[in-house]
Amino acid sequence: MDDQEPMDQARARGVRYARELEGHLTWLDTFSGTALGVLAVASGIYTYLGVSSLLDDNGAMAAFAAIAYSVAVSVGIFVFWSYMLRLFPAVRTARARVGLLGAMGLGSLAIIAMSSWLNAAALAGSAAVEQHLAKTVQDYQGSLERAHEIALSAQGLERDVARVRQSFEDLSEQEATGNLSGLAGRGAVFRVLRQKSAELSGLESQIATQTPLVATAFAEGNQILSRMRALTVEPGPVEARSVEFSEQAVRLAGLITQLRQLSVASLVERAAQDLSASVVLPELDGSTAENRGAQGATITSVLEVLAQRATTLERAAQAVLAMPPPSETTYTPISSADAVILYARNFVPSWAGAIAIDLLPAVLVFILAITQTAIRSGREGAAIEDTLTLAEIRAALVAMRDMETAGAPAAPSRDPSREIAEPQEPVRVTPLKST
């Protein structure tokens, strides 16, 4: 008997706790449906904005299609979460809850696929397209600078060519004074040296003519880049700016190609290969066999030096040709929805907001499930008569009186006031099972 009394008190407290939670749920149910409808409509509005950005046509049919899609999304979200709010807290078995959790996960993925990414496009679509433009500007800037670097390195070969040319001119001067072959004058050895010096001088002049072209192309490319940067941050619709940005990108791509063509590295490489291979040997003009022998020996030595200089020049040109070329950069216009997906990591808050507005009811589902579990726990072990509310007892009394009235003969009317005043025997009530 002593143990029974604390148990009864605990059950009574559990029943009061369950009734308190039920009262809160009853009050929350008065506006939960409205709140869910507002969330669904808000998601539909942003979905409409996202769909509108994907449609090329701005006519009435496109607007109707966008409205139809957004309405379907709103209805789908409202119906789906209404099912979850009603069914998930009501099920009791673990198997049923796992099944509904799987259905909730599948439905959430469907909502993200049909709505959330469009909501993100509406929230951050323009900013994502601007991010794409800025990224493209960086790529073009890298390509332009790389092409200019290669062109400048090729122009630097002019000094190597000038050094080799100067060495042949010095040798020819030595031959003219008789300090090379021992025969003063402008004979066969002198003409060979002057021949190669003239070839290198022409190559040097050709390289020099490219220098102002490289500088002009690079300066124009920087001007285009400045305009492209301005287009990424200018106010106004990003679609209109993207059109001009595309035009500037085409011009810049042409300038980068021009800079690559202005590189003279391949020209210097071919000239170096021809330097020793194409030597026109003049007739030896020594007056004696000994002099002609000296000239032949000197020309042989000159050809060896020529081959060495040509190899050095060829290696310098090959070093420039071995430099990594500028990356191929092409601007590809993309829609705001595609830009949001491509640069998703840069717009995490927008993605979080777009997904939260669709999946926030999942939190309400879990709150209801936890509350219903607490209510069942509070009622566990309590007798049925302890769980009946005053309204249920009154309804039961009225039902019993109706049953007695229907089965008994008509009784004289009695005064209700006397009925209340006169004591009556207590009526035993058969407890009804609570639903």
Image (cartoon, rainbow, N blue to C red):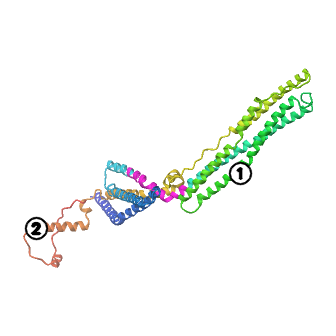
Look at the image and tell me whether residue 169 can be seen: yes
Name the N-terminal-most of marks 2 and 1. Answer: 1
Dot 2 alpha-carbon crowd within 10 angstroms: few under 14, some 14 to 19, many 20 or more: few
What residue appears at the point 18 percent right and 62 percent down from the top-left corner? 430
Q: Nearer the viewer, residue 425 or 287?
A: 287
Judge whether residue 279 is colored magenta.
Answer: no
Contact (Cβ within 8 Å) of mark 2 with mark 1 = no
Residue pointed to by mark 2: 406
Which mark, by number, is residue 393?
none
CA–CA distance between discs 2 and 1? 110 Å
Q: Residue at x 31, y 52 (%)?
A: 92
Q: Position of residue 299 (x, y in %)?
A: 84, 27
Where, quadrant-wise, is the C terminus in this rendering?
bottom left
Q: Is residue 202 left or right of residue 220?
A: right
Q: Residue at x 38, y 56 (%)?
A: 366
The percent position of residue 327, horizontal first and vertical second, equals 62, 44
Secondary structure at numbered mark 1: helix
Direction from residue 126 to residue 168 in the image, left or right? right
Tag in front: 2 or 1: 1
Q: Position of residue 281 (x, y in %)?
A: 81, 27
**Nearer to us in this view, 124 or 192:** 192
Residue 41, image quadrant: bottom left
Viewer can see residue 160: no
Q: Which residues are magenta?
A: 106-129
Q: Image quadrant for the N terminus?
A: bottom left
**Looking at the picture, which amino acid does disc 2 mark?**
Ala
Residue 313's x, y, as percent? 76, 35
Q: Which mark is residue 216?
A: 1
